[in-house]
Amino acid sequence: MNRMKIEREDILDLTRRMTPKRTSMTRIAGSYMDKNGEIDGTFNINFLKLSEKEKRKNLEIAKTIPFAKTNVKLVRYVFPEKSMKLGSMWQLLMGMKSCGLKNDELMDVFYDMIGQYYQASHDYGVFIFHDCYDIPRKASDHQRLGESEETFEYLICAICPVTGDYEPGEPEWGFMFPAYYEKSGAINFIDVFDAEEKNPHKELLSLLGIN
């Protein structure tokens, strides 16, 4: 597997915005799955229409991925060229990003693929966030110059165990795609989170096509 080092300062550019007041999240979608990977229900919501309580709760889930210890629990992988083709997970993620999670057919395909691969001993939820971050222009001394020149559009996925009335626990696995690299989006990189360092979910790396 080809890996790239993650620069922590790049990640901080994004996480500083992940508060209910400053968030630029546009949408949250997801599915609730039983331990066998069968879908129990789905949702797809405009993030800004959530209550302040729900925004805070869901941002805590989303933040777990970029806040993870870089290059240990959050690892940057390079998509091999053979994995960036028609019918690949990479193509599906590009489609999900481009539609801002608004295409339910694409989302259902994604949930089905997670259900086929993810090895779990419990029910779980798949939470997907869409964000558009306006990258600020900065001078050589890092002072902001004004209006942004580029928007970084990306997805965060978090898979969490769920209990009771679909109440999510701490994320077990997830990713951020594309990766934020050198103040821009790198569509051939993906940052993958795994809570278990000793027993990682290698089956999901296979699903992504990066192992």
Image: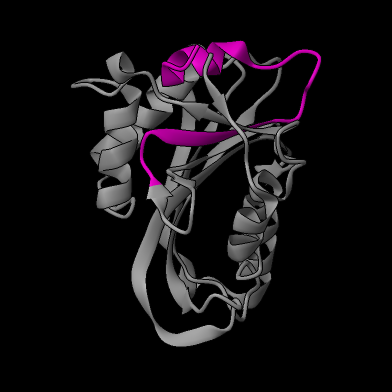
Q: Position of residue 5 (x, y in %)?
A: 62, 35
Q: Position of residue 94 (x, y in %)?
A: 29, 40
The answer to whether 20 is drawn above or below residue 172 in the figure is: below
* Between 74 and 196, the one nearer to me in the picture: 74
Q: Residue at x 34, y 36 (%)?
A: 93
- Whether residue 7 is in magenta: the answer is no
Q: Residue at x 59, y 35 (%)?
A: 174
* Between 60 and 8, the one nearer to me in the picture: 8
Q: Is residue 112 left or right of residue 51?
A: left
The answer to whether 3 is drawn above or below residue 120 in the figure is: below
Q: Position of residue 57 (x, y in %)?
A: 69, 61
Residue 36 in sight here = yes
- Whether residue 189 is in magenta: the answer is yes
Q: Position of residue 41 (x, y in %)?
A: 46, 38
Q: Is residue 88 left or right of residue 134?
A: left
- Report the span colored magenta: 186-211
Quadrant for residue 201, please give it.
top right
Q: How is the image coloured?
A: one colour
Q: Residue at x 22, y 20 (%)?
A: 87
The answer to whether 93 is drawn above or below residue 183 in the figure is: above
Q: Residue furthest right?
A: 198
